[in-house]
């Protein structure tokens, strides 16, 4: 299942993990890591596809993409 919904992906550097991490606020507990931001995003896209497929397999409605990007000051 390819992610057709525009879910927000947040990417940040984690000093403790020494890796770039991604989360998707609209998909609880979904996350991924990578050595570069692009690696983390690619991993996150796979994680999101798996999350959405599992949701669909359980007969649950897919969440609406509601999260908005944060605006930097």
Image: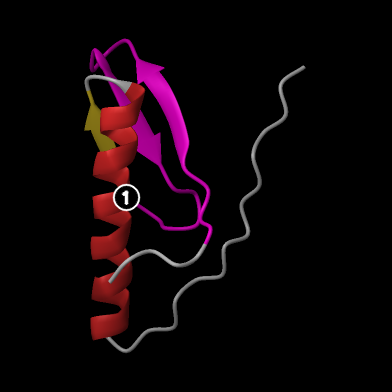
**Residue 15 image point, x, y percent:** 32, 10
Residue that mark 1 sits on: 45
What colouring method underlies this structural image? secondary structure
The quarter of the picture where residue 35 lies is top left
Density class for disc 1 (Cα within 10 Å; few <14, some 14-19, many ≥20) is many
User: Relative to 63, is 12 above or below?
Assistant: above
Residue nearest the observer in this picture, 38 or 69: 38
Residue at 23% over, 63% down = 50
Foreground: 16 or 45? Answer: 45
Horizontal arrangement in the rendering, residue 17 relative to residue 4 (left or right): left
Placement of 33 over or under 35, stated as above or below:
below
23 or 37, which lies in front? 37
Quarter in which the N terminus is drawn? bottom left
Which quarter of the picture shows residue 39?
A: top left
- How many marks on residues? 1
Instruction: Tell me the quadrant of the picture where the C terminus can be found.
Output: top right
Is 58 in the magenta? Answer: no
Q: Percent position (x, y) of residue 16?
A: 27, 13
Q: In which quarter of the image is residue 55?
A: bottom left
Q: What element carries label 1?
A: helix
Query: Residue 20 in magenta?
Result: yes
Residue numbers of the magenta segment? 6-30
* Secondary structure predominantly adopted by residues drawn in magenta: loop
Tell me the residue at 29%/32% (across/down). Answer: 40
Q: In this view, does 31 lie above or below 2?
A: above
Residue at figure coordinates x 29%, y 62% from the top left: 49
* Image x and y of residue 24, in percent: 44, 48
Query: x, y percentage for residue 70?
Result: 67, 33
């Amino acid at each position: 299942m390819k992610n057709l919904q525009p879910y927000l992906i947040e990417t940040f550097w984690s000093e403790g993990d020494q890796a770039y991490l991604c989360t998707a606020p609209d998909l609880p507990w979904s996350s991924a890591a990578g050595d570069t931001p692009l690696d983390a995003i690619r991993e996150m896209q796979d994680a999101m596809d798996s999350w959405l497929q599992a949701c669909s397999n359980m007969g649950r409605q897919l969440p609406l993409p509601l999260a908005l990007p944060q605006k930097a000051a």
